[in-house]
């Protein structure tokens, strides 16, 4: 059973726990960290979601990410999720967006890396493939039906900066 801290809309702790898979009560939120990986050569990493994922199976997303666990802030969750889902170890992340949906507060980060591009690790049950795309290819690919559009919407501010 995965436990999360409950948060108020303003991002402060609500003093309660949430359980993954259970309905989040109205007025409460959980934290999700998403990390865009950009190589020092300018290429972007896209991960293909596992075909068995309940949400957006098989689609690509320019992000590693997931929910913050109990006691874990968004930055620490980002560092952990990045390592678990890609094998990339970040020394520093730059926050590039923060937004919310009906029950989720998203924290988006940018990881600039010089990792070996062939060293990306796939996480069983999470990802099945990956791509490295040049900026122009990336900006074109995110408009396709192979890309998770809800993620594109969350990272629009960042996309506007790199266009």
Image (spheres, rainbow, N blue to C red):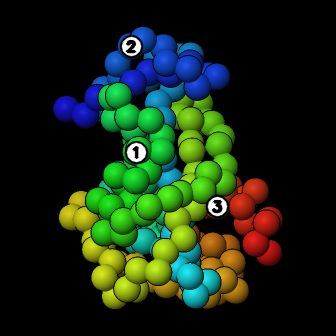
Q: Quadrant of the C terminus?
A: bottom right
Residue 55 image offset from top left, x and y in percent: 41, 52
Q: Quadrant of the N terminus?
A: top left
The kind of secondary structure element at disc 1 is helix
Disc sitting over residue 16 in the figure: 2
Comes first in the chain, label 3 or label 1: 1
Q: Which mark is residue 47?
A: none
Percent across and percent down for residue 110 are 57, 62
- Position of 34 relative to 105 (above/below): below
C-alpha span from label 3 to label 2: 31 Å
Choose between 50 and 64: the one closer to the eye.
64
- Distance, label 3 to label 1, CA atoms, is 20 Å
For label 3, count other residues whose C-alpha is less than 10 Å away and answer few (under 14), some (14-19) or many (20+).
Answer: some
Callout 1 environment at 10 Å: few (<14), some (14 to 19), or many (20+)? Answer: many
Q: Residues within 10 Å of mark 2 (few under 14, many from 20)?
A: few
- Helix, strand or loop for disc 2: strand
**Occupied quadrant, residue 133:** bottom right
């Amino acid at each position: 059973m995965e436990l999360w801290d409950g948060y108020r809309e303003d991002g402060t702790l609500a003093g309660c726990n949430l359980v993954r898979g259970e309905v989040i009560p109205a007025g409460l939120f959980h934290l999700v960290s998403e990390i865009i990986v950009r190589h020092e050569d300018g290429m972007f990493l896209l991960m293909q979601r596992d075909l068995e994922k309940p949400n957006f199976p098989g689609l690509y997303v320019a992000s590693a990410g997931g929910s913050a666990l109990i006691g874990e802030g968004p930055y620490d969750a980002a560092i952990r999720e990045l390592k678990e889902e890609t094998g990339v170890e970040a020394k520093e992340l730059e926050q590039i967006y923060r937004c919310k949906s009906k029950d989720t507060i998203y924290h988006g980060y940018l990881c600039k890396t010089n990792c070996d591009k062939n060293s990306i690790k796939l996480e069983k049950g999470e990802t099945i493939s990956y791509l490295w795309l040049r900026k122009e290819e990336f900006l074109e690919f995110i408009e396709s039906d192979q890309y998770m559009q809800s993620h594109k919407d969350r990272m629009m501010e960042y996309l506007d900066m790199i266009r």
